[in-house]
Amino acid sequence: MFGKIKCKNCGAKNPKNAKFCKECGSNLKGTICSGCGAPINPDDKFCPNCGSSITQIEVERKSKATPIAKETGKIKVWSRMPQDFARRLEIKDIKGILTKKITIESGTKALFLQGGRFFGELPPGTYTVGGALKAIKDLNLSEKATVILVDDSDTELNFSISGLRTSEEFPAGAIGTLVISIENPIMFFNNLMKGRDLVKTTDIEDILRNEMKNILQSKIKQHSFDDLYGNLELKQEIAQDFEHLMNTTLSRLGLRLIHLKYFDYEESYWKDVLEKRREESIEKQRAKIMQSARERILGDKIHALKTEAEIAKYIDEIDKNKLLRSYEKDELIIDLKAKLEEKELLRKQKAEVLEKEHELELKRKEEEYLLEKERKEDELDRKELEMGLDALRDLKAIKREHEIEMLDARSKATVEALIASTSDRETKAHLAELKK
């Protein structure tokens, strides 16, 4: 054992400075204590830092170490953890591995790389002796090969991007899910796995985070909060642009974007804005309710309200959502009472005015009647006067005619006859004088 490290998985002896088992590819170094995080050497039975038993030690989930390839009996099992995006195995004795019985766990497939070329993949399943070798035909069995264990299906990457800003500098964020797969294993290996034995889904998310942030910021910065919030059409437009640009980014890494499964704004960043808008909306509704109540004071319904209790009940009816605060209700009650009193005063004043107008109208009609009566009486008097004058004129005319006749008769009579016909002494004397 001097100068050798025994693999705890398969028991093979490896050089002291070896990192991986030459037989099974298991990690020989790089494990850490689950209790304190201190490095653990392959031969340690207890943690040199905290004394934890070696049975408590596990491969730290965030390490870059290659997973231990399990072996059940004579069957070698290749597996990966659910959070792993890709695990790397460096296999020196590729012929020895592929000529044995191999099981690739369900949900995992193995990609074979050698000399900068991709030689194919093994889907999940158990391969009998030599079965794997037949599936991967062109490998050079005398050279080491790299095996990358990845998900057999598409992989979902959840992302949460913060630090975005709207056009008016409101904070913003985005969340979503990308569905991706490895399209070019060589490009993927060269860009993401050189010097690494493990790439987790969270690693991919971290690698893509800045690119996603730049893409989203360039889109969201063009719009205001009011444009973005609740605008489904605009959100779909941003999501489509984001999906297109991310596909270009992923292709440079040897990955392929299957589709953008989910995309939305992280509304927690807009909590303060929404709360402020909600308060503003409530204030507007309160003002609307109070305005409505004040306007209804002019309606017919308000005539039925007599007491403060009736007014309070009326306010409760129009404030169905209980938006008004207590002091606002009190203020409204006082206001409504004042308006009711004012309206009652106006009603009385109007009634008095109407009564006065009615009295004036009656008086006017009475005066018109009297004037008309007087006019008719005057008209009657005028007609009677005219009739009297006409009669007088007729009488005078008759008298004149009579006098004319008399004068005519007199002119023909003797002086003695004239003296005899008159009774007037002066006339008789005058006639007697004429006779001499």
Image (spheres, rainbow, N blue to C red):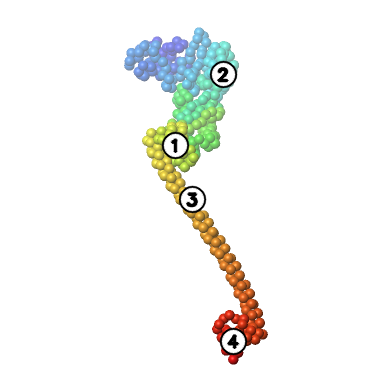
> Which numbered mark, 2 or 4, is in the foreground of this view?
4
Q: Mark 4 points at which residue?
A: 431
- Kindly check if marks 3 and 2 are in contact, taking CB atoms under 8 A apart as contact: no
Q: What residue type is labelled 1?
A: Leu
Describe residue 239's horizontal placement relative to residue 413 as left or right: left
Front one among 73 and 220:
220
- Kindly check if marks 3 and 1 are in contact, taking CB atoms under 8 A apart as contact: no
Q: Which amino acid does label 3 sit on?
A: His
- Residue at 61%, 72% (x, y): give it: 395
Q: What element carries label 3?
A: helix
Q: Which amino acid does label 2 sit on?
A: Pro
> Which numbered mark, 1 or 2, is in the foreground of this view?
1
Q: Residue furthest top?
A: 73
Front one among 332 and 361:
361
> Which numbered mark, 4 or 3, is in the foreground of this view?
4
Question: What distance separates the C-alpha of mark 2 from that of mark 4?
Answer: 180 Å
Question: Mark 2 or mark 4, which has the lower sequence index?
Answer: 2
Q: Is mark 1 on a helix, strand or loop?
A: loop
- Kindly check if marks 2 and 4 are in contact, taking CB atoms under 8 A apart as contact: no
> Which numbered mark, 3 or 1, is in the foreground of this view?
3
- Residue at 53%, 35% (x, y): give it: 232
Q: Mark 1 points at which residue?
A: 305
Marking on residue 123: 2
Q: Position of residue 56 (x, y in %)?
A: 39, 13
Question: What distance separates the C-alpha of mark 3 from that of mark 2?
Answer: 106 Å
Question: Mark 1 or mark 2, which has the lower sequence index?
Answer: 2
Q: Where is residue 210 in the image (x, y as percent from the top left)?
A: 45, 33
User: Quarter of the image containing the N terminus?
Assistant: top left
Q: Position of residue 427 (x, y in %)?
A: 57, 84
> Which numbered mark, 1 or 4, is in the foreground of this view?
4
